Image (spheres, rainbow, N blue to C red):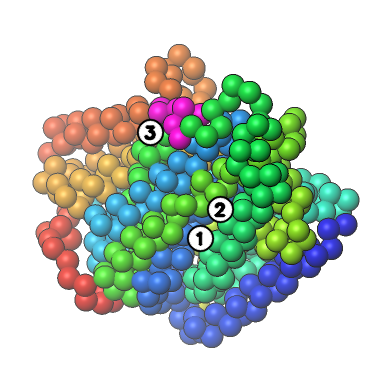
Amino acid sequence: MHVIPFAIVCLYIVILYAISWYSTKLTKGGGEKGYLLAGRGLPASIVAVMLTGLAVGGASTVGVAENAYKAGISAGWYNGAWACGGILAGIVVASRYRALTISTIPELFEKYYSKSGRFVGALGQLVIGMVITSLQYIAGGAVLTALLPQVFTQVSGMAVTALVFVGITLIGGMWAAGLTNIINVIMIYVGVIAGAIMSVRNIGGIQALKLALPAGGTWFDPISGVGFAVIGAWFGVMISQCFSLQATVQISFAAKSTKAARNGFILGGLLIFPIGFVSALFGIVAAAQFPGIVPTNALPSVVLTLNPVIAGLTLAGLWAADVSTASVLLLGSSSIVVQDIIKRNFMPHMTEKQGLLYSRIAVLVISIVTYVLATTVAGILKTITIGLTLTSAYSVIMMFTLFAPKLCRKSSAFWTLLTGIIFLAAWLVVPAIRIVSQPIFLAIPIAIVTFLMTTVLDKRSATIPEVNTSNLSSEVVA
């Protein structure tokens, strides 16, 4: 029994719950807006740690190590792509999104385009968010299985992980996610970096590690392990999702001002960058120490060879990565369910108190569905890359909306999204259409062509206020 690491993780969970209970004081009386958007009061520092927490989850730690177990250090570019996306979003769109004072991306689609655009937009965002959430359960289950193999299986570890995610999110909402992410990011950096240093030291240093690795691998080549095509796909997917995934842009919606949104995203991108390469180092060490293991267990297996205190801190950091990502994803999906499905179609006059209740119910139901989905998913990075490919259609719509509104038509959002969904479904079931190595390389041009076709064929202009495309100040926007 790994008593010390387990005790550290348990203590960490208790601290997270305590912070979540404290956060309820900040949202008291805030209703749905306070729960889902922190009353639009997050400063730049919390915006930054929330973006970092969302990015550095199971895919960015356990998933990167899983990939590095086979491909080497180049797997770390997954986080490099995430970082680039966050910084670009901060420079280009975060302040503009904050100025829109909306709650969801599909809400904007109905406001500017059509009801059908909102419906398809909500459906796509839900699918994306739920796929990514399910991957956090897999990563959390891998941590607990490695920590206490006598107690947990992958399935039971996933179940316990789900209970922790759901509890924290149900209690405090967006403020809980923001405050706990301060602790989460500290734990991620302290634990993962300390663990990486100790794991390399235990094996005898970098040179000894190179000698222990299977010959002929691309272990320390910065590119060729996963290859230009995969790295390019990561950059395309991550930049796209930073511009349009509900869970990501909801962070900017919750900022206290346009300036806080912009600066928080840029700082968050800088924080995200190094963790991927550190996590990849765990995968490389695992390839030397544990040939033949299940790749998903690469990182946790290495950690448990370390000093118990360092192992506990590192595992707590890995758990932190899952908690931080899942909480924001659950809130994003809950916003879609409440705003774009329940409120839009069934309860247009929903009160703040009712909105808070339904938000919590949505978090609970989505958690159950995503847990069931997690039991059928394999290959963390591959799955998440395919799932996030759909955000390319959303990003194309948002870029035209903000920067070329004269080209937007009433049907643009609906057809661009529907075509994107059909393409991704076809990619999964019709191998003959895979004329490129990654779906993102077709998804982006298809979305652009579809959007421009509606410009030509539909004469009804979208109703986009000119103010949303003008220069923005850094003043607080209610």
Look at 61% across and 38% down and name the residue there: 207
Which mark, by number, is residue 53?
1
Give the residue type that dot 2 points to.
Answer: Gly
| Real-space CA distance between mark 3 and mark 2, rounded to the nearest whole angstrom | 21 Å
Vertical comparison of 419 with 436: above or below: below
Residue behind mark 2: 57
The reply to whether discs 2 and 1 touch (Cβ–Cβ < 8 Å) is yes
Residue density around tag 1, few if under 14, some if 14–19, many if 20 or more, within 10 Å: many
Instruction: Out of 395 and 312, give the one closest to the viewer.
Output: 312
Vertical comparison of 174 with 293: above or below: below
| Residue 405 on image: x %, y % | 15, 49
Q: Is mark 1 on a helix, strand or loop?
A: helix
Residue behind mark 3: 232
Instruction: Out of 337 and 250, give the one closest to the viewer.
Output: 250
Disc on the earlier residue, 3 or 1: 1
Q: Residue 213 sits in which quadrant?
A: top right
Give the residue type that dot 3 points to.
Answer: Gly
Look at 24% across and 55% down and name the residue there: 92
Residue 228, magenta (yes or no)? yes
| Real-space CA distance between mark 2 and mark 1, rounded to the nearest whole angstrom | 7 Å
| Residue 6 on image: x %, y % | 78, 63
Instruction: Out of 314 and 266, give the one closest to the viewer.
Output: 314
| Residue 53 on image: x %, y % | 51, 60
